[in-house]
């Protein structure tokens, strides 16, 4: 291997044409992604604390495999009545937000009553489970 190729890779012995993980992320980055988590329904019923959820996201979101490494690449903000906006200037998955939302619901013991539904691309909504009342059907008979 040439010494110029070793200098470019920082002294590590890699193939000259190999694409590293950082370069692949940089090549596939399209632009800022905007995600909205709408929790207005449970927040209006006072069973979901939006500010605690925002703090949870600040503490748990990983950037470059490190927790608490948000910097300017990921911006989390609260928008009025129970909506949280996450703007990512790096590769970021909506499924990761859904996973963290479910994790928060489980921690708060709300997972039995609330579910996370994707209403459109980049928008997630917390909805109550539809409960069918079997007692009312039994009374009619």
Image (tube, helix red, strand yellow):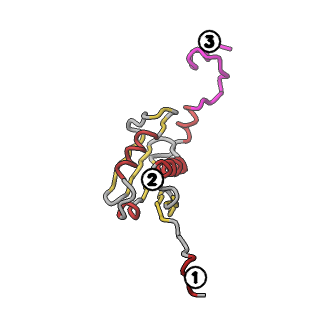
N-term mark: 2 or 3: 3
Q: Circle 2 — which element?
A: strand
Image quarter hosting the C terminus: bottom right
Image quarter hosting the N terminus: top right
Q: Find the residue positioned furthest to the top.
A: 3
Give how far apart the Cα atoms at labels 2 and 1 are. Answer: 41 Å
Residue 139 drawn above or below residue 94? below
**Marks 3,1: beta carbons within 8 A:** no
Q: Is residue 67 magenta?
A: no
N-term mark: 3 or 1: 3
Count neighbours of disc 2 (C-alpha within 10 A) and say few if under 14, some if 14 to 19, many if 20 or more.
many
Residue range of the region highlighted in magenta in the rendering = 1-21
Q: Quadrant of residue 6?
A: top right
Question: Viewer-nearest of labels 2 and 1?
Answer: 1
Identify the residue under disc 2: 35
Q: Circle 1 — which element?
A: helix
Q: Quadrant of residue 138?
A: bottom right
Count neighbours of disc 3 (C-alpha within 10 A) and say few if under 14, some if 14 to 19, many if 20 or more.
few
Question: Viewer-nearest of labels 2 and 3?
Answer: 2
**Marks 2,1: beta carbons within 8 A:** no
Give the overall secondary structure of the magenta segment. loop
Q: Nearer the viewer, residue 8 or 43?
A: 43
Q: Find the residue positioned furthest to the bottom.
A: 141
Q: Is residue 5 left or right of residue 98?
A: right
Residue 21 drawn above or below residue 54? above
Identify the residue under disc 1: 137
Q: Is residue 6 left or right of residue 60?
A: right
Residue 121 drawn above or below residue 77? below
Identify the residue under disc 3: 3
Give how far apart the Cα atoms at labels 2 and 3 are. Answer: 45 Å
Question: Viewer-nearest of labels 3 and 1?
Answer: 1
Q: Is residue 11 magenta?
A: yes
């Amino acid at each position: 291997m040439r010494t110029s190729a070793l200098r470019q890779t920082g002294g590590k012995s890699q193939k000259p044409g190999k694409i590293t993980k950082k370069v692949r992320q940089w090549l596939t980055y399209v632009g800022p992604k905007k995600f909205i988590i709408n929790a207005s329904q449970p927040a209006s019923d006072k069973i979901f604390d939006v500010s605690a959820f925002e703090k949870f996201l600040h503490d748990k979101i990983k950037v470059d495999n490190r927790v608490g490494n948000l910097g300017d690449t990921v911006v989390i903000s609260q928008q009025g009545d129970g909506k949280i906006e996450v703007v990512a200037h790096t590769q970021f998955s909506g499924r990761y937000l859904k996973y963290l939302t479910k994790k928060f619901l489980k921690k708060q013991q709300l997972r039995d009553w609330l579910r996370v539904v994707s209403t459109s691309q980049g928008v997630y909504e917390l909805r109550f489970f539809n409960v069918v009342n079997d007692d009312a059907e039994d009374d009619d008979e």
